[in-house]
Image: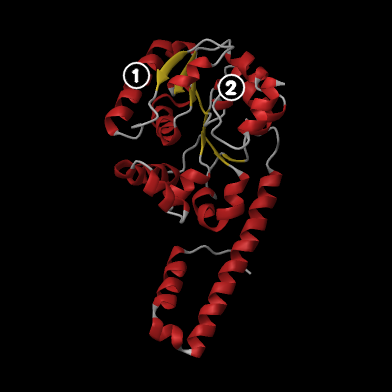
Amino acid sequence: MGLTNEPEKIDALLKMINDSDYFSSKDNHLHIKNEVDYFLKSNEYLKEFIIKLSEKIEWDYMSYPVVINKINNFDNFTLARYQDGEWSCMLRIGPHYSRKYRNGPRPRLEPLSDELLKIIKQKPEYYISVNAGTFDERVGLVWPYLKDLKNLIVGEIFRSVSATKGLDDFINSIKNRSVILVGPDYLSKLKGFGREHVKTPIDGLFKKTVMNKIETNLESLLEKYKTDNPVVLYSCSFVSKIMCDKFYNKYSNTITQIDMGSTWDPYCDVISRPYHKKVMTRLKG
């Protein structure tokens, strides 16, 4: 069986299913059932294919030790994370998207989601990280957008290390670099390394005026430190991905950019993900 994830095929199936006259015919009903079975089996094979593919990615390609070595050696790179939440919004995957839309910043969530998808469609050359859970649950939907990416990473780089042994090696590596932190005010509690801090609001983060201000402040600091090979650490949701792309296109690999997501939260007494409890337990142990 070949692999398939054709949006047109899915749309055609939905139209057939929603057409009561068509669906009521016994022959047509059997046809729809066969098409659905084929689609489900196809995605099952696709999932197995992706898992096998991810297992072939060399550990030396991009991992926690490699990140540290790159930072120590001033080997600049950009890494953006596109995880479950991003894909749910980018592809309007329900019920996750509808919940986010209902509870989120409605006027801006849709255009920002479209902007992220546009970035992925342009096949950026920098590292794109997608967690294994995304492949497990949404493989048939996301794979067409990922299969041609030059630097795809399957899995989390910081999560397990943070929960088990801590990020001391990473913190020690960035001590020797000019660091720009982009994230909420509570990240000011972070210890162990000096940095400039572009503070981002929690409420209103997606407003265009707010994003423009973040971009302006960050660009000012990048110009200030551009001869120092600065390291930018992002913790600001969708804005992280957009800034990574904007400044990679401007500075390429003369700077390092890392989308840290919520990695720093438990180090600032904030629990925003289930695994953060393990980090907090380790920190207090």
Viewer-nearest residue: 200 or 115? 200
Decide if residue 14 is on the left or right side of residue 154. Answer: left
Going from N to C along the chain, the mark reached first, 1 or 2, is 1
Vertical placement of residue 226 versus 148, above or below:
above
Q: Quadrant of residue 111?
A: top left
Tell me the residue that label 1 is attached to.
Answer: 217
Looking at the figure, which quarter contains the C terminus? top right
Where does residue 141 sit, x and y in percent of width and height?
51, 56
Residue 194: horizontal and vertical position, in percent?
52, 10
Regarding mark 2 in the picture, which secondary structure is present there? helix
Q: Quadrant of the N terminus?
A: bottom right
Identify the residue shown where x is 67% and y is 51%: 51
Q: How is the image coloured?
A: secondary structure
Asked if one can make out residue 2 in the rendered structure from this viewpoint, the answer is no
Residue situated in front as seen by the camera: 221 or 147:
221
Residue 64, quarter of the rendered image: top right
Give left or right: position of 216 versus 69: left
Query: Which residue type carries mark 2?
Result: Tyr
Please state which amino acid type lies under the numbered disc 1: Asn
**Which of the numbered marks, if any, corresponds to residue 267?**
2
- Name the residue located 43 percent from the left edge and 29 percent from the top edge: 248
